[in-house]
Amino acid sequence: MEQVDVSDLTWEQKEKVLRHLFARMNRNISSPVAAASRKVTIKASEEEPQSSIMDREAWSVILCLIIIIIIIIIVIIIITPTISNAP
C-alpha cells in the first residue's frame, strides 16, 4: 500500500477521502448485524485467525479517531483567523 502525505492532497481530494471514510464508518455503525455477517463471511472464506480480525477492527477505530482529530484541526485552522479578524 502506497503512503500519501495529507499535505500533498488538494482540498477536493481531502474531502473525497473524508467522505469515503465517513461512509465506511456509517456502514459499520448503522448495521451491526451486517458487520457481524461480514466478519463471519471473512472468517469462513479466508480462514483468518480471530486475532487478525480484531487487529483490523482496532486499526479501524484508530483510523476513525485520526480522522476526527484531522477534522477538528481543519475546523480550528478555519475558525481561528475568523475569530482573530473579528472587530
Image (tube, rainbow, N blue to C red):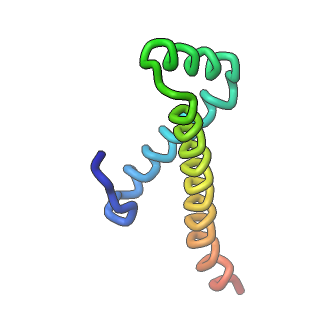
Image quarter in which the C terminus is found: bottom right
- Residue 71 percent coordinates (x, y): 58, 58
- Say which residue appears at 59% left-offset and 36% top-offset: 54
The quarter of the picture where residue 66 lies is bottom right
Q: Is 69 placed left or right of 42 in the picture?
A: right
- Say which residue appears at 42% left-offset and 18% top-offset: 46
Residue at the far left in the pictured view: 2
- Residue 86 percent coordinates (x, y): 69, 82
- Residue 53 percent coordinates (x, y): 54, 32
Examine the rendered structure and indicate whether residue 36 appears above or below residue 70: above
Residue 23 visible? no
Image quarter in which the N terminus is found: top left
- Say which residue appears at 63% left-offset and 71% top-offset: 79
Q: Is 4 placed left or right of 71 in the picture?
A: left
Residue 73 visible? yes
Is residue 44 or residue 79 the one in the foreground?
A: 44
